[in-house]
Image (cartoon, rainbow, N blue to C red):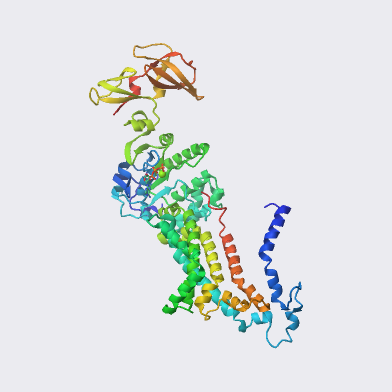
Amino acid sequence: MGRLSPFQKIYLFLIAGFILGPFLPLIIQSFAFRWAWPDLLPGTWWLEQREKSPIPLAWDYVLSPYSRIWEATLNTVLIGGIVTAICLAICLPAAKVLARDRFRGKSLLEFGLSLPLIVPETAIGIALLMMFIRLGLAGTYTGIIIAHLIPTIPYMIRMLTSVWQGLGREFEEQAMILGASRWQVLRLVTLPMLMPGVVAGALFSFLVSTNIFLLTFLLGQGKIVTLPTLLFSKISGGQIDATGAGIALIVTVPGIAMLLISERFLREEAFGQGFGN
Amino acid sequence: MPLLAKARHVRVSREGVCVTEVQLRSVAKRFGDEVAIEALDLRIPDGELVALLGPSGCGKTTTLRMISGLETPSAGQILFEGRDVSGVSVQERNVGMVFQRYALFPHMTVEKNVAFGLSIRGLPKSEIAERVAEILGVVQLSEYRKRFPSQLSGGQMQRVAIARTLITEPDVLMMDEPLANLDTGLRGEMRRFIRELQQRLGITTIFVTHDQVEAMELADRVAVIFDGRLAQYGAPDRLYRKPASLNVARFLGATNLVPGRLRDPDLVDTPLGTLVCPWRQGQTGDAVHVMARSELIDIGTERTAPTDIEGRIIAREFFGATVSYSVACQNTHVNVTEQARRMLELGAPVWLKLAPEHMWIIPE
Ligand SMILES: Nc1ncnc2c1ncn2[C@@H]1O[C@H](COP(=O)(O)OP(=O)(O)OP(=O)(O)O)[C@@H](O)[C@H]1O
Ligand SMILES: [Mg+2]
């Protein structure tokens, strides 16, 4: 690792600014009491008003039970986690077949698997809603989890298929010849070798799930709040106030946490430098 | 030898290492409609090093995979020490296989890779450590034990793969093109390494190659396979001097294959004239080929015997230690190779001596 050239520094700085830029007004807003356009900074800060106000303001409100933020966070993480786990369980074996076997209708199946990415979310949501109301799944966790699987599975299948393709059969065959049982092969060879791809896929489907608004909104029927639906209800008036900004910031927390955890995890895997040959 | 006791198909050699005779009885393998192996009969004596030699796609890898149990033969039997192993799973066959691309587990260090076969058997940690240290010493990789496979050279990776296989004390060791991925210098070194190791351990070894020089140098016996069929099986010098068919002769690099017709048990009419070669089979009029290895033909500038064949040098190639001449005789060409003690001039008239004992007749 050498030093960065000035050009590289500016480049990185611009990218960081582009990605992190929108957060700055959000952070300021979340501490504001009144912030009128075109002032550069809020005219009145939340802390100045904190003692005077009869009701909790800004962060006090966001973190209070009235905001339902804890409930929404818990729901979001729970649904995201379960969706990811089910998605992995479905996609790992499916991707293995897609990567290693040849069969009739394979390309048709592959095309069909990307359909959910092409069909508008609204159409899927309405169609599911009609079915789920009849099945009694509307407004239930089960219903939402099933709905979340629809956009996450295509991504996961794609990622895991390429991961399986990168893993030749010879590693598993070698382990078997050395005496490993099927279970030992899976545990000691296959899964560890798939791990980087699995972690990336899991991270991705978790992020997708925790960001789904429309499907959750339609199928949750207001009974199940997640962070995106909660945020939407706060900002649907077209205005963003301190509590809206605060909730918007909280919405990013599960994703960031997941990112950090997986980052850490991947590093610990200590794959020398990639997969030799 | 703690692990050996439980393997069934095992005998113990003089050196205390297990040896197993492997036999294939009309083994066939089809993949769908495609026939990979027609019918293979092969007996690999215990403790020998046998090469499966053949062009790409002839079924060498498939044969190894069937012996190891990774593929099930479509027909025929595979026997270890006379016992059919069709019901024995890969895990229980107690064979070793070194894959062409080594298949080292990339997420494990050298040490962990080598220990794999023992740790899955649940051996005590101290015993594993001891045996890993010992085998790493044998393959001269002790100082690399903490490295990951991606941090090793090709030759080192291969030695790790061999160590990982040998530590489980397999009854049969198989290697798929063990030298194909190495550069020329390393190839010679690994060839000697494999040969020495095999002789020291006396383990029955089958290796696959499509390089005839490699097969000759390493193997006790060579099985030449064409299109899923055994073309010839025998000691390297026999294959080299007395190939059973034209294809085998060509595959083993024979250059002078002259068509002819049998006139008498000892005489063949060829474009080079009537040659004298001992041959007690076939009938007068049979079409045959006469093989004369280029290095066994004497070339001279003077006629010394009435049977000498007259020719003219039309091309010359100098290889340093040897020199190779292309000689036009009558209406064919004959290649002659000799030690580069002298250089004959292009266009010079020469006389070739084809000694009867250096010629070999291949029936059509
Ligand atoms: N799993 C399989 N499915 C279908 N055909 C196969 C399979 N494995 C091998 N074959 C076919 O069987 C034949 C023999 O293959 P094999 O791999 O044994 O050849 P090989 O002698 O090892 O060749 P190479 O020197 O190129 O490695 C080939 O025609 C190959 O296409
Ligand atoms: Mg092969």
Give the vertical position of B225 relative to A130 (above or below). above
Image-quadrant location for residue B44: top left
Measured from the top left, where is residue B260 in percent x and y?
30, 22
Looking at this rendering, what residue extends furthest in the left direction?
B283
Looking at this rendering, what residue extends furthest in the bottom direction?
A54
Q: Can residue A20 be seen in this view?
A: yes
Measuring 22% from the left and 24% from the top, which residue is drawn there? B283
Q: Can residue B121 be seen in this view?
A: no
Residue situated in front as seen by the camera: B191 or B102: B102
Say whether residue B116 is left or right of residue B356: right
Measuring 33% from the left and 30% from the top, which residue is drawn there? B246
Residue situated in front as seen by the camera: B78 or B54: B54
**Image mark count:** 0
Residue situated in front as seen by the camera: A244 or B124: A244
Give the vertical position of B49 relative to A237 (above or below). above
Measured from the top left, where is residue B356 in percent x and y?
33, 20
Measured from the top left, where is residue A275 in percent x and y?
53, 52
Measured from the top left, where is residue B284 in percent x and y?
23, 22
Image-quadrant location for residue A130: bottom left
Q: In which quarter of the image is ligand 1?
A: top left
Measuring 49% from the left and 19% from the top, which residue is drawn there? B341
Image-quadrant location for residue A259: bottom right
Give the vertical position of A228 relative to B255 (above or below). below
Say whether residue B109 is left or right of residue A55: left
